[in-house]
Image: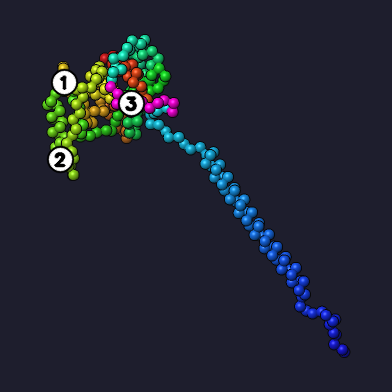
C-alpha cells in the first residue's frame, strides 16, 4: 500500500494569520477584564463616599445634657463675665415693681409680678444627693417672668470636710479673732501637708457694695452673684462663712429624710447658687424674693 501524501503547501503548523487573530482576541479579553475591574473599583469608591457623607449628615448626634435647666440658652447672651466684674450700682435702682405673695407647701415669699417659685420634694430638684430614698423638701427654684431659673436651693447629703478655710473673707465688721483663728488653723494644716502648701488667702470685702437681708432665717449679704452667710449670732458682727461652710447651710425649719440600705437619717444641709444667665437688672428683683423668703409657720 502506498503511503498517503499530504497535499502540497499544507503543514501541521498553524499559519501566521491564525496566530495574529488569536493573539488579538486574548489582548481584547484582558483589556476588557481590566476595564471591568477599574469600573467596579470606581463604583465601590463612589458608594463608600456617598454612605460616608450620608452618615456624617444624617445621623443624629446626642446633644449634651445640661446639669441644670438654667444652662445658657442659645439666644440668651452670657452675663457671667460682665456681671462678675461690674459693681452693684444697679442695686439702688427702683424696685417698686408690682409684687405678689407666694405661699407654697413649705415656703412663703414676695415675688415680682410674673416671677414664680417651684418647690421640689423627695429627691427632685437637686444634683447633690447620692443614691437612696428621700422624703421632704430637696429643691427650690426661683424663676423670672420669662420662666428661666435664676436662683436655686438644693438639698445636700453625704458631704463632709475639714474645718479649715483656704480663702477667708472679711468685712469691716468682721471680728479679727475670727479671721485669725481660721488663718492659723489653716496655716498649720497647710504646713503639715507634703509638700507644704501656701498660707490661706484673706479677701477684704470692706469696700464692696452689698445687699443684706435674712434668707430663710439666716443673715446674708449678697455681692454680685455670691451669697455670704454670717457665722456669728452677735449683733453688729458679720463673720462670713468660709471653707466647707461657705456653701453648705442649715436653714431653721428645713430638712429632709434620707433612707439607704434600711438606715434612715434626718438631714438639714442645703446649698444655693445663681444661674449663669441672670441679668444685672434682675438681681434687685431677686433680692425682693430672697429677702422675704421664709419657712412657712416660722
User: Any mark on residue 191, and which?
Assistant: 2
Residue 297 image offset from top left, x and y in percent: 28, 14
Binning the other alpha carbons within 10 Å of mark 2 as few (below 14), some (14 to 19) or many (20 upward) gives few
**Left or right for 258, reference 238:** right
Residue 74 image offset from top left, x and y in percent: 44, 28
Query: Extreme bottom residue here?
Result: 1
Which label sits in the foreground, 1 or 3? 3
Q: Is residue 118 above or below residue 47?
A: above
Question: Residue at position x 74%, y 72% from top?
Answer: 19
Quadrant of the snapshot with the N terminus: bottom right
Question: Residue at position x 77%, y 75% from top?
Answer: 15
Q: Which residue is mark 1?
A: 173
Q: Secondary structure at mark 2?
A: helix
Q: Secondary structure at mark 3?
A: helix
Q: CA distance from mark 1 to mark 3?
A: 29 Å
Q: Is residue 5 above or below residue 104?
A: below
Res. 196 in view: yes
User: Any mark on residue 82, and which?
Assistant: 3
* Extent of the magenta region: 74-87
Amino acid at each position: 500500500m502506498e503511503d498517503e501524501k499530504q497535499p502540497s503547501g499544507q503543514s501541521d503548523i498553524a499559519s501566521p494569520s491564525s496566530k495574529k487573530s488569536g493573539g488579538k482576541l486574548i489582548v481584547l479579553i484582558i483589556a476588557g477584564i481590566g476595564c471591568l475591574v477599574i469600573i467596579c473599583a470606581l463604583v465601590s469608591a463612589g458608594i463608600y463616599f456617598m454612605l460616608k457623607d450620608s452618615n456624617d449628615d444624617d445621623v443624629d448626634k446626642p446633644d449634651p445634657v445640661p446639669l441644670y435647666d438654667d444652662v445658657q440658652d442659645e439666644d440668651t447672651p452670657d452675663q457671667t463675665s460682665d456681671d462678675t466684674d461690674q459693681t452693684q450700682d444697679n442695686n439702688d435702682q427702683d424696685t417698686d415693681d408690682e409684687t405678689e405673695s407666694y405661699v407654697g407647701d413649705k415656703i412663703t415669699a414676695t415675688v415680682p409680678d410674673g416671677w414664680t417659685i417651684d418647690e421640689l420634694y423627695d429627691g427632685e430638684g437637686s444634683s447633690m444627693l447620692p443614691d437612696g430614698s428621700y422624703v421632704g423638701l430637696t429643691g427650690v427654684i426661683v424663676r423670672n417672668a420669662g420662666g428661666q431659673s435664676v436662683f436655686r436651693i438644693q438639698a445636700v447629703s453625704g458631704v463632709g470636710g475639714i474645718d479649715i478655710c483656704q480663702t477667708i473673707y472679711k468685712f469691716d465688721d468682721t471680728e479679727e479673732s475670727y479671721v485669725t483663728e481660721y488663718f492659723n488653723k489653716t496655716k498649720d494644716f497647710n504646713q503639715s501637708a507634703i509638700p507644704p502648701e501656701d498660707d490661706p488667702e484673706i479677701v477684704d470685702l470692706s469696700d464692696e457694695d452689698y445687699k443684706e437681708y435674712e434668707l430663710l432665717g439666716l443673715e446674708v449679704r449678697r455681692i454680685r452673684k455670691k451669697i455670704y452667710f454670717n457665722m456669728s449670732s452677735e449683733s453688729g458682727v458679720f463673720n462670713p462663712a468660709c471653707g466647707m461652710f461657705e456653701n453648705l447651710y442649715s436653714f431653721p425649719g428645713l430638712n429632709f429624710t434620707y433612707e439607704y440600705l434600711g438606715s434612715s437619717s434626718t438631714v438639714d444641709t442645703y446649698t444655693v447658687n445663681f444661674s449663669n444667665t441672670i441679668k444685672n437688672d434682675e438681681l434687685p428683683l431677686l433680692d425682693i424674693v430672697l429677702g422675704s423668703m421664709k419657712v412657712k409657720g416660722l
